[in-house]
Amino acid sequence: MQGSVEQGTHEAFVPQGLPPLPAINVHFFAETTAGEKLFRQVMADRHLRRTHAEVHPGGIMGAVAAYAQAPTPELLVVESSAAPEELFRQLQALAEVVVQGTRVVVVGHVNDLFLYRRLLAEGVHDYLALPMPAEQLITSLSQLFLSDPSAKLGRIITFMSAKGGSGSSTIAHNVSWLLAQEHQINTAVADLDLAFGTAGIDFGVAVAQTVADALSASDRMDEALIDKLLHKCSEHLMLLAAPCSLDEVVPVQEQTLNMMLDILRQLVPLTVLDLPGEWENWMRAAIVQAEKVVLTANLDLAALRNAKILLDSIRKLRPNEAPPLLVINQVGMGKRPEVPVEKFVEAVGAQDFITVPFDEVAFGTAALEGKLVVQHAPDSEAAQALHEIAVKVADLPRRQQREQKSSGLLQSLAPVMEKLRLGTGRKAK
């Protein structure tokens, strides 16, 4: 098929994605204050956005009482501070009211491998002990609903702009190219700016079938369809291009977008979402699904205001996640007045940021030649900043960075070292 590619040589460097839970009922029964706090953290997480989640008091016995006359939900998470033997008596009472098909996860206060194995043998789907971070419980719950727990799921990186014209698409496309070409990670770019997307131009391809064909096919969307629509730009880079036509713009439905992203996770290790410059409500789904969010802004007051609004909103959507990476683009653009970088970062409350200097010649010439700036001017300061963004969003380890830098340094010094070796040899004679 058109988009099928072989496994990339560096895919192990990209951590596995964690899929969201399906649209199910999830009930938590807390026994202690610590348990309730943990459950509310988990309930607010983006991975449970599709679920209908509730937190109740009473622990296991509270659940027994609640379901004496009511069916249990698809997922039940119960806390118990009881000693092992009392815990098993409580679970026997719970087993009498739990309907078939309900997955039960127990959160206890005893960290014991023998207890864990015994509980799983009794039919509990997982056992975790307090204290623990919310991410540990979220991971456990997500893995319960994987059709193939051994399968590696891809990750999603969402690129968005604080204001139109900030260059978010340029950043996204250059970073995607670097991840695919330099790091050999199989990467798919989904251009979701349906009317005016530029990914096709930047990658130098023209396609007949676009991402709009996927978003308008919710009734028949599957891996075969998405794989057919993916255009192979190079060995490791694929594209779901935008139609770039006002006549082909389709309303983006959150449910359909989630279906497409779930499939992309199964097909490729990395998916880059290039969002439009103007805010749409469906973009929340793209933010919630992503492992990493990159927000691009310019150093003007309108971008500052918008960036703060967006960063605050994204933090609420992703309370358990690291904040978005802020990319301050086009720094030093001619004689244009700019808000100082330090004041901009402080005002928007960004915790992690990278600046990309404006290089009129490099970007302009690259655009005229139909290339990306990392292709045309790989040694420019802008290209180096884009490399830094790529390494950060893909969580490439520092070890790999050092190897690449050392390799480049040794290559550049090779002629000098050879001359020194020959010179030393002559002196020895």
Image (cartoon, rainbow, N blue to C red):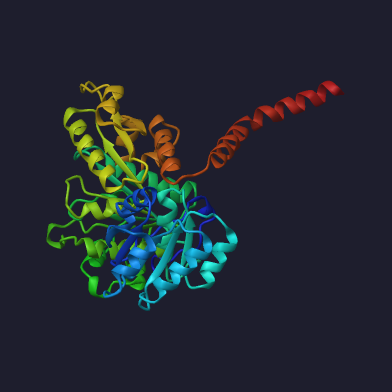
Question: Which is nearer the eye, 143 or 100?
Answer: 100
Write the residue at 65% across / 30% down.
Answer: 415
Tell me: residue 420, above or below residue 248: above
Q: Quadrant of residue 424?
A: top right
**Residue farthest to the right, as pictured:** 429
Query: Is residue 420 in view?
Result: yes
Tell me: residue 392, above or below residue 111: above
Q: Quadrant of residue 219?
A: bottom left
x and y, in percent, of residue 6 in the image? 50, 63
Tell me: residue 189, above or below residue 337: below
From the image, which quarter does the C terminus lie in?
A: top right
x and y, in percent, of residue 411 in the image? 61, 35
x and y, in percent, of residue 338 in the image? 23, 23
Write the residue at 59% across / 63% down.
Answer: 114
Q: Quadrant of residue 172?
A: top left
Question: Which is nearer the eye, 377 or 183?
Answer: 183
